[in-house]
Image (tube, rainbow, N blue to C red):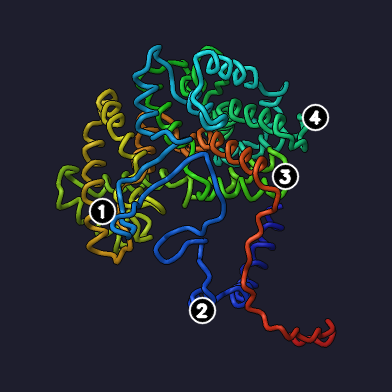
Amino acid sequence: MADNRQYVEDFAKSNLDLCLAHNYIDPDLFNTYGVKRGLRDKNGAGVLAGLTNISLVQSKKEVDGKMVPCEGRLLYRGYDIYDLVKGFLNSSPKHYGFEEIAYLLLFGELPTSSQLANFHDALNKSSFLPTNFVRDVIMKAPGKDIMNSITKSVLTLASYDERTADTSLPNVLRQCMMLISTFPMLAVYGYQAYNHYECDESLYIHRPDPNLSTAENILRMLRPDMKYTELEAKVLDLALVLHMEHGGGNNSTFTTRVVTSAGSDTYSVIAAALSSLKGPKHGGANIKVVEMMADMKEHLTDWSDQEAVTAYLEKLLHKEAFDKKGLIYGMGHAVYSISDPRAQIFKGFVEKLAVEKHREKDFALYSMVENLAPKIIAGERAIYKGVSANVDFYSGFVYSMLDIPTELFTPIFAIARIVGWSAHRMEELINVDKIIRPAYQSLLPLESKHYVPLGERTE
């Protein structure tokens, strides 16, 4: 087996030059043909590909006939994210936000008390896995990449559904609710299997408690003693709400709509979205922030020394520190410029959690980097819009304070974002009956090449 793998790897390396030679495209040709790379123009604006009533992401407003940057805004079904967060945190009776905001995104309206109770009950009744599924699927071939584990589990769940291919709206909604409710188990159990079989640690499989919120159950299932504080659960709940939806243009949600438009089943659609989200340029960005900050702390003798922090950030941009990619992770966003409202909301709760966890020194360093980085980037780079901290800058720090292992950072994102994916899948099915099929400009000549028989080809 090892010899075969080595043979194939050597073959791939020896033929790589051919692959590169015939696949390279001169970057200038994108401008020649007016192709928007990454479906975005030079100013970062995305190609308009659809319409949605689910959310609104705003970073610019019109002033005197010109579009100018503004404070970032995020609306779910017309409600400002600030108002939603303030609402469920301060409402009476007290409750967690995940289930309420999930209902809003799926059905378009804030639920009444009875509607929320019924929705919570429906999620609980969906929150089960087939007999021996944990043993036969999740614990088989466990690995460090929990996103792959979840994707495998989702595709396998399709085999247990007698109506997998039924794309009628009631059935799709049922499937989406089942996946929303089981994602926490798929993620946490996938990690527990890896931690036991690969890291030689004790194995804990705790069942979710139907009386608890999604955030509480994640902490309950993850921790050996199943204990957590109210603040911990509230901060995790807030993180889930802030990551739940972000317009139709982000990569994983667009993937959801593309695969949905092909007529594919819910399990395949969500598996495709998971594969998109796991990329370090999308859902895995917060891991890079945590790793960058750890490297920074290793190279600083005094974390409060602003000059030393500034010097380190400049080295990052000059490709002289950390991964030498020239990036300050957690800074900047494809849409937001002046501010990311999710990061703004998060920051106040991050500080409270840092106090509870006695990590005020870490929080002070994060705050310093948040203040310094935009100025340093603006001074070093020619940028077309402002730069500010995005939600990923703080989310990894929060997860580390909650003792959530790095392997679960992106899966936590997925547990939240599947709600948005489900809403966009339903919207695509209801409104559009055409497959999404963008065009690519071919660079091949119209005159075809002459086929040379195998025996006549020269080495």
**Disc number for residue 162:** 4
Where residue 192 sits: x, y (%)? Answer: 55, 28
Q: Nearer the viewer, residue 456 or 261?
A: 261
**Sequence order check: which comes first, mark 4 or mark 1?**
4
Q: Residue at the location (53% across, 23% down)?
A: 202
Q: Amino acid at mark 4?
A: Glu
Q: Amino acid at mark 1?
A: Pro
Give the secondary structure at mark 2: helix
Q: Which residue is mark 3?
A: 264
Q: Is residue 99 visible?
A: yes
Instruction: Give neighbour class at mark 3: few <14, some 14-19, many 20+ (Cα, 10 Å).
Output: some
Q: Residue at the location (52% across, 61% down)?
A: 39
**Sequence order check: which comes first, mark 4 or mark 2?**
2
**Sequence order check: which comes first, mark 3 or mark 1?**
3
Q: Amino acid at mark 3?
A: Ser
**Sequence order check: which comes first, mark 4 or mark 3?**
4
Q: CA distance from mark 4 to mark 3?
A: 15 Å
Q: Nearer the viewer, residue 310 or 230?
A: 230
Location of the C terminus (image quadrant): bottom right
Q: Residue at the location (15% across, 48% down)?
A: 306
Nearer to us: label 2 or label 1: 2
Q: Residue at the location (39% across, 35% down)?
A: 80
Q: Which residue is mark 2?
A: 32
Nearer to us: label 3 or label 1: 3
